[in-house]
Amino acid sequence: MIEIQPSVRTHKLSGRDFDLIAASAAGPGTIAVLARAELSKHLLLLRTVMAVGADRFPSAYSAAGLDSGFQLLTDVQRTDPTTAAQVIGLPHFGAWAFRCLSGFHRDSDDRERAAELGRLNALAALAAIRSGLEARLRVPVRNGALALPTLGALHLPGPAWAELRHTPGVGTFALPPGRAGIRLPIGEGSGGNGRWSPVARLRNPPGSVPVEVLVDDVDPALGTTYRRGRPGGEEPDRRWRTHFAPAWRLLSRHHGERARALAAALHTVVPLAARPTGRTSGTAPSAFGAVAMSPPGDAASFAEALVHEFQHVVLGALNDMMPFTERDSGARYYAPWRPDARPVDGLLHGCYAYIGVTEFWRRVRAHVSARHRAHVEFARWRSAVERTLDALEEAEALNEAGVRLVRGMRASTEAWRSERVPRAAQRDADTLNADHRLTWLTSRPAEARPR
Amino acid sequence: MVGPDHDLESTLIDLTEIPLPELTDLDDSVLAHALRRIEELVATSEVSAEFDSSI
């Protein structure tokens, strides 16, 4: 148990919000509570980056001009605190701070560290642009691109840094050393002689739950977080636009509460390259509000991936507020969705994600074209989740919050038991689960097989 | 066991109302537990850098 000094105020979560999260029923109000806690996390990260950077890497800190970015952010907070909080709360901000802190431990040189640290200036510039303040500061140019979070990237080969100037009513300009200024056509779509790659935005189709999601393949912090960096200049994969509207309509019509919560939590999708074995997706706890995934193959798969990663986003944020386990006991468990054995924390997060996936298929299986597959998905993950919950209920490492979480997760699955599945689909689901278990068992020596 | 009407205390310090200049003035000793949590989070982030759809 961590002791907290009485003078320090900490975040609180109502029992009702906790239980809503446990039941995979968090709505926009609960998401807002989590987002507020994430804002504190980002501020703490900012403070830590500034303190550790100045103390341990003074040359990089100075070269990055971090104080000018911090001062600009302070000016924005003074005049427009809402915008400052929105920018500090961005997944780009969390990803940036984590990259800096983890980079402090890596073997990188001062030039690299300065470029990493200097991304704060780009975030501060964004805050100034959004709040209509004047800005003039240096920002790093990485891999030939000057990226402004959530807005886009300017293709700018050559310099490592460029000055950025923003004058309200006039415009935003990049001034590379020794070259003429380049106007950034922010909010005007593609332009700037093809040099400017705007971040794509996906919006809900008419009649569905309102949402706007960025498809960001230019932000260097998110890109490196997800090992997916690509210079700007290419049009984002058309499949995002093609499949988003039907995916969102599917969620809005048949899983409306989840769509509303997703709209509140989901800010950015980071495109990943598909693996040779198929689609992939993921969520980093450092970037609340962002998920990463390979381009979708169809609307139902896109919606499923969004729900899956949304579950990780929510539980990751709750886990930032409180631990679910005591110290790792070393116990490892079979996870029906992974080739490796998992610690109880990983098992818990995975199970929570697959509860979301199972509920998704339960709700939409009668409304998608590939019905057999939908029934199989529901039946497969229903069994897998039930089995995993059995293991979690026996896990000794869970603390009080973890026990309560698992109890809520179990309760949320009770309605599944009476659901009927076509015989052929159930058979295929059982075969898939049995094959996975068998492969898992035979891929490791008997003494290494966990519970 | 905490009931549904009771708040759960987080270990995360609430900084949402702090003016930024005061952020850098916070004493390490005040933030000790929070800084430990940051270290944990950074470590977690490193582990979870192996991305896949199934955690």
Image (cartoon, rainbow, N blue to C red):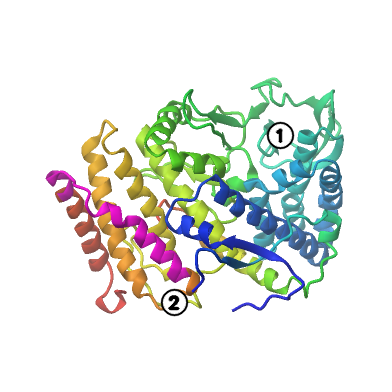
Residue A147, magenta (yes or no): no
Locate residue A68 relative to residue A140 in the image: left or right. right
Q: Amino acid at mark 1?
A: Pro
Q: Same chain for marks 2 and 1?
A: yes
Residue B4: % across, % down: 50, 64
Badge 1: residue crowd in 10 Å (few <14, some 14–19, many ≥20):
few
Q: Amino acid at mark 2?
A: Ala
Give the residue number, with chain letter if any, for mark 2: A397
Main SS of residues in magenta: helix
**Does the image show residue A228?**
no
The stretch of residues the image draws in magenta is A402-426
Q: Quadrant of residue A180?
A: top right
Give the letter of the chain under mark 1: A
Residue A416, magenta (yes or no): yes
Locate residue B53 relative to residue A230 in the image: left or right. left
Secondary structure, mark 2, is: loop
* Residue at x 54% of width, y 60% of height: A318
Badge 2: residue crowd in 10 Å (few <14, some 14–19, many ≥20):
many
Give the residue number, with chain letter if any, for mark 1: A157
* Residue at x 68% of width, y 69% of height: B34
* Residue at x 53% of width, y 62% of height: A15
Residue A381: % across, % down: 29, 53
Residue A365 lies, with reference to residue A325, above or below; the image says above
Q: Residue furthest front?
A: B5
Residue A172: % across, % down: 80, 28
Give the letter of the chain under mark 2: A
Q: Nearer the viewer, mark 2 or mark 1?
A: 2
Residue A103 lies, with reference to residue A256, above or below; the image says below
Which is nearer the eye, A66 or A133? A133
